[in-house]
Image (tube, rainbow, N blue to C red):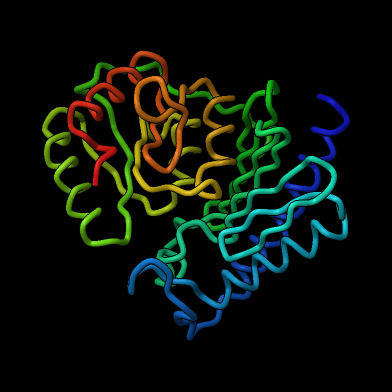
Amino acid sequence: MSDLKAELLDVALEAAARSGTFLRDGRPADLGVAATKTSAVDVVTEMDIASEKLITDFLAGRRPGDGVLGEEGAATEGTSGVEWVIDPIDGTVNYLYGRPEWSVSIAARKDGETLVGVVAAPMRGETYRAVLGGGAFVNDEPARVRVAPPFEQALVGTGFGYLAQRRARQADVVRELVPHVRDIRRGGSAAIDLCDVALGRLDAYYERGLNPWDFAAGDLIAREAGARTGGRPGDVLSGELTVAAPPGLFEALQNRLEELGAWHD
């Protein structure tokens, strides 16, 4: 591991641990919605905002020359060439309702390439991490995808957007897909879903409409655990479509989603 990667991993792990502890232990009993974004059900809580500030303040102290891109508005270009991509709470609705499937996602990239990814899931007692070329881990144990099952035996994760028209289209895709796989799961945190592919807790995952902070860390963790990731056939993963699965199943799912027009609202 290069000195830069080692430093970035150390910083990301500490930032995620601090934020995760703050969110777990400091959640108000009367937590409410502070704002909405794309629709009335796309919510932001006061803890999202506080978590992002905790992380950005920490990063500014440890690596003041770095850029930052955060879900709740943090955006600085920096001078070092390193950019941090932050989701202070991935799975905000779960967090709002007191459900355990939420995480803190932090990635560091340079020259467009993600070097380090950390996803902390405090209610699971787990932290997932990866360094480019260095493998993936959950806590201190190596993470590895399952061997690809036949398509009809695949447990597939997905998620839904917050705009009614997109949700309706996503429901159509699920209706067409679910008779042909083992089952569908919807957890509510894209970062955790990608890490669950890395751990073999899901065989595959797909979703339309993600943002860079949703997938930056989880994508690297899944790839370093042996998954393939991408978007539509021939494309990298993006807001248009994100797909992750072991080789073999990846191509089958990607092609089926293309047939179903899963990238189209």
Q: Is residue 171 left or right of residue 133?
A: left
Q: Is residue 7 left or right of residue 231?
A: right
Indicate the position of residue 2 as horizontal and vertical percent values.
84, 26
Splitting the image into 4 quarters, where does residue 112 fall? top right
Query: In the image, what residue occupies the spot 62% across and 29% down?
Result: 136
Q: Which corner quadrant holds the N terminus?
A: top right
Q: Is residue 167 left or right of residue 77?
A: left
Indicate the position of residue 209 as horizontal and vertical percent values.
38, 48
Query: In the image, what residue occupies the spot 17% across and 54% down?
Result: 168
Splitting the image into 4 quarters, where does residue 264 fall? top left
Indicate the position of residue 144 as horizontal and vertical percent values.
53, 24
Indicate the position of residue 190 as horizontal and vertical percent values.
44, 47
Q: Does residue 155 sit above or below 120 in this rendering? A: above
Query: In the image, what residue occupies the spot 29% across and 32% down?
Result: 155
Query: In the image, what residue occupies the spot 34% across and 43% down?
Result: 208
Point out the residue furthest to the top here: 248
